Image (cartoon, grey):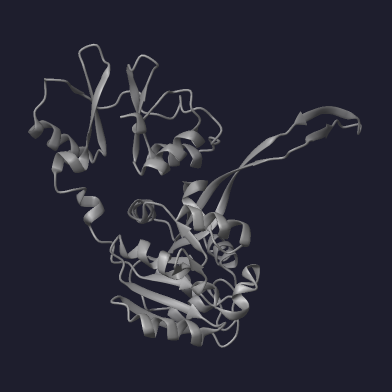
Amino acid sequence: MKNITAQPDITIRQAMKKLSKFGKKCLVITDEKNLLLGTLSDGDVRKAILKGVTVGDPIQSVYQQKPTVLVEGKYSLVEAKKLFVNHKFDLIPVVNEKGLLVDTLFLEAVLKNGDSRQKEKLDVPVIIMAGGRGTRMEPFTKILPKPLVPVNEKPIIEHIIERFINVGCNEFHLTVNYKSRILKAYFEELQPDYGLHFVEEQEPLGTAGSLRFLDKQFDQPFFVTNCDIIIKADYRSLYDLHRKFGYDITLVASAKEYVIPYGTCELNSEGHLSHINEKPQYDFLINTGLYILNPDVLKLIPKNKFYHITHLIEDAKEQGKKVGVFPIDDDAWIDVGQWAEYRQAVDRL
């Protein structure tokens, strides 16, 4: 149980890393004597961040302090199954009569057939923006299109596609321009068993301009991803959040921490030194390049015009549309589009 237990003095960032590292959706919170204090789900973490809580804050005010529990020796498997099914829990702590944590029941183990929510196929279209020149990855991209840059004996784009296939997505649209013939030849040789369609840019149209060519082709929200990022996130939870809150666009954002390695000077209103902040730390939510879009937002994209996804988000907001954010841990985002991150990606995948 060590992998899924934590104490209440850890930060939200530490909780996110633990959830990401061990691939669980929930932590069990205990004190130093193993007394059960509560539970903390990935959904609790996301809600807290979106309400303005910083990832450097402790989890005391975030975790569920009155969780559903089972008492050792006083429950049946039938009762446990009903709780999991009716409340959609990912885990239920088991305590003894003194309230000490003695076991944890997991959904997949109790139901034996796995998590039905995970097995439900998304069957959602995926658009991969694969037409850029990839100048940050030169000299590789002087020869290959960026999506074919290899990471551990497989090109980046195969890593991306595999993650979507694992959740049931089977229809992929690739927007192509730079060295598109090489990219097409690769897939022709690969002969994949999933649906693959190419969307041709006659000239570079930015990170969203070519999406206009797909207007009226979808009747449900769809994924859009850059071709140089790998996201280790729960795509089902992402899609569910988009639908539940009625967003028109949802972007995935990584919780990043930046530390300035110097003392920063703060001035007062007279221009004199007020105080020095020694190595200040800042927390940001960084756009990763993975989105969910509703089909009707494609009408906002001008035809045959250079146009970025940031333009689309701003125009959507001006039209009164809802834009949501899905926070993830920074370890769950691998940006393969620059050399420093590329070397880390080789080690992390």
Quarter of the view holding residue 97: top left
Residue at image coords 47%, 52%: 348
Residue at image coords 25%, 61%: 121
Q: Nearer the viewer, residue 67 or 138?
A: 138
Indicate the position of residue 220 as horizontal and vertical percent values.
33, 68
Res 102 seen here: yes
Indicate the position of residue 49 as horizontal and vertical percent values.
50, 39
Query: Is 218 rendered above or below residue 12?
Result: below
Residue 338 appears left or right of 228:
right
Q: Nearer the viewer, residue 133 or 273?
A: 133
Name the residue at the front extreme. 153
Indicate the position of residue 264 as horizontal and vertical percent values.
79, 35
Residue at image coords 46%, 28%: 59
Q: Nearer the viewer, residue 322 or 57?
A: 57
Indicate the position of residue 277 as horizontal and vertical percent values.
76, 30
Q: Nearer the viewer, residue 296 or 110?
A: 110
